[in-house]
Image: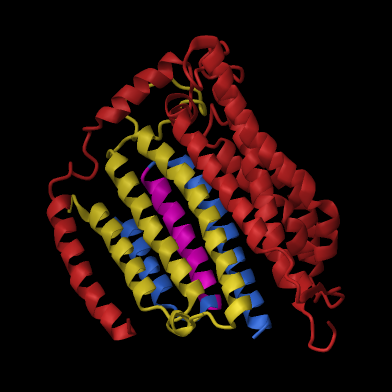
Chain colours: A yellow, B blue, C red
């Protein structure tokens, strides 16, 4: 099945979004958002993969550069994305803490009802 | 192929866990399975970031948030 | 909008996304195919600049502007967290004497592994242009390594060990150093974030020019950012308690 990797990636994105839609707790939504983001990482890396290729690093053990390596461009994108999305998740969790302090609840349906 | 299936199942498990303190642990396990998948896809840099961040930092912050919001309820 | 209405709308939209995804996916190159045009170009450019780790070369040399943007996001969200999690008016510091009980084995293991982890983190940062790793990964390792003090010991010792202000400065210095090196590249050779320093010696420690320096700057920034983040969250969860009514 040569498209299995891409399908798993899209499944993760959809499952994460489903979790956000059905969630009763803001923290649960934030974690499901993190799952959906991981789906994009899987998609990026699956595109860059080549069977029987090595990682695009030649420093250890020191070796002569060859061309049959996995794609470094998508790996570079994904690795900065991983760290940055963790920080954004932290920001969302901090907002959840503040919301809880101000309104006493973390249920999205109840929060919708608080106006004014 | 196996790693992809494990990742898909772990992700579904994280979404289906409703109790947020258990979800933090499930998220750590999901992060670890992702790191194994990244190594299988020959991407050691990404696996390094994923282990440090997704297994140590984000579950810790989720747990601390859960603790904080349970406290003043 | 009620929960069932949301679910119905998601079922419709999600179904459409799934159909389009499957249609798109069968048109992608097969999983594991040898057709990667970006990889070929990145390989040539990375080897031309004598950088052994192609991923670091892409991150800091070929697409350095993207990395500047990403670390600015990091800086901004840590700033956002610091603002959001400051002490509110109805909270006070709560001296937590009841610290619970840590196994002696955990304590010993933590105290031994902490310096090793921090050293390994610095090694990952500085060798980012040779081995898998670099500023982002090594910064995370250093940041979490210092918090082993919290796992193995008491929160108060962790607090004494890491006052927050130097780390907030450290984060700003790291981000500023990255931008400053970019401007230096602009002044010297007309391109922002150009690779200035000599980069000969493939596979040696002093190769790849500014990639190693930018790695260091990002490593400082990420490590400080992680420290500040975890410090704010720990402080919120452990130290601050809502002041009881009647004590205002």
> Relative to residue C184, is residue C90 depicted above or below?
below
Left or right: where C97 falls relative to C169 = right
Q: Nearer the viewer, residue C248 or C68?
A: C248
Q: Residue at x 48, y 23 (%)?
A: C52
User: In the rendered structure, which segment of residues is drawn in magenta?
Assistant: B21-41
Q: Please identify the quarter of the rendering in which residue C175 is found.
A: top right
Q: Residue at x 56, y 77 (%)?
A: B21
Q: Residue B53: percent from the left, percent from the top? A: 55, 53
Question: Depth check: A89 or A100 in front?
Answer: A100
Q: Nearer the viewer, residue C207 or B2?
A: C207
Q: Is residue C138 above or below residue C217?
A: below
Looking at the picture, tell me which residue is in the foreground, A42 or C192.
C192
Residue B32 located within the stretch drawn in magenta: yes
**Residue C34 x/y as whole percent:** 22, 33
- Magenta includes C107? no
Instruction: Specify the quadrant that holds the N terminus of chain A.
Output: bottom left
Q: Position of residue C120 (x, y in %)?
A: 67, 40
Q: Is residue A72 left or right of residue C22?
A: right
Q: Position of residue C107 (x, y in %)?
A: 80, 62
């Amino acid at each position: 099945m040569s498209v299995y990797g891409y399908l798993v990636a899209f499944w993760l994105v959809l499952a994460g979004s489903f979790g956000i839609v059905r969630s009763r707790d803001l923290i649960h939504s934030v974690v499901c958002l993190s799952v959906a983001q991981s789906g994009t990482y899987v998609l990026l890396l699956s595109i860059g993969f080549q069977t029987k290729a090595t990682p695009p690093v030649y420093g250890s053990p020191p070796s002569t550069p060859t061309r049959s390596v996995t794609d470094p461009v998508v790996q570079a994108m994904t690795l900065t994305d991983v760290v940055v999305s963790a920080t954004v998740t932290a920001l969302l969790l901090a907002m959840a803490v503040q919301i809880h302090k101000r309104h006493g609840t973390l249920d999205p349906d109840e929060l919708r009802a608080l106006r004014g | 192929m196996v790693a992809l299936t494990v990742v898909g199942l772990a992700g579904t498990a994280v979404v289906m866990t409703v109790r947020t303190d258990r979800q933090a642990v499930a998220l750590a396990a999901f992060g670890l399975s992702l790191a194994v998948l990244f190594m299988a896809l020959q991407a050691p840099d990404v696996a390094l970031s994923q282990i440090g961040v997704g297994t140590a930092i984000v579950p810790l912050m989720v747990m601390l948030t859960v603790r904080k919001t349970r406290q003043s309820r | 909008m009620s929960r069932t209405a949301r679910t119905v709308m998601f079922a419709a939209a999600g179904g459409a996304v799934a159909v389009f995804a499957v249609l798109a996916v069968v048109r992608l190159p097969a999983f594991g195919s040898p057709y990667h045009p970006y990889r070929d170009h990145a390989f040539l450019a990375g080897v031309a600049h004598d950088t052994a780790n192609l991923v670091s070369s892409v991150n800091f040399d070929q697409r350095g502007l993207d990395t500047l943007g990403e670390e600015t996001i990091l800086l901004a969200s840590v700033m956002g967290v610091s603002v959001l999690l400051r002490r509110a008016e109805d909270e006070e510091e709560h001296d937590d004497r009841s610290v619970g009980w840590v196994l002696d084995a955990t304590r010993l293991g933590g105290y031994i592994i902490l310096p090793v982890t921090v050293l390994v983190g610095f090694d990952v940062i500085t060798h980012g242009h040779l081995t898998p790793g670099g500023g982002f990964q090594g910064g995370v390792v250093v940041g979490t390594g210092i918090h082993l003090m919290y796992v193995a010991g008491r929160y108060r010792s962790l607090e004494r060990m890491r006052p927050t202000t130097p780390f907030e400065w450290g984060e700003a210095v790291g981000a500023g150093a990255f931008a400053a090196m970019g401007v230096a590249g602009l002044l010297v050779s007309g391109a922002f974030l150009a690779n200035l320093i000599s980069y000969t010696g493939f596979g040696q420690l002093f190769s790849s020019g500014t990639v190693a320096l930018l790695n260091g700057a990002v490593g400082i920034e990420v490590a400080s950012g992680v420290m500040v983040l975890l410090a704010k969250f720990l402080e919120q969860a452990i130290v601050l308690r809502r002041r009881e009514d009647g004590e205002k």
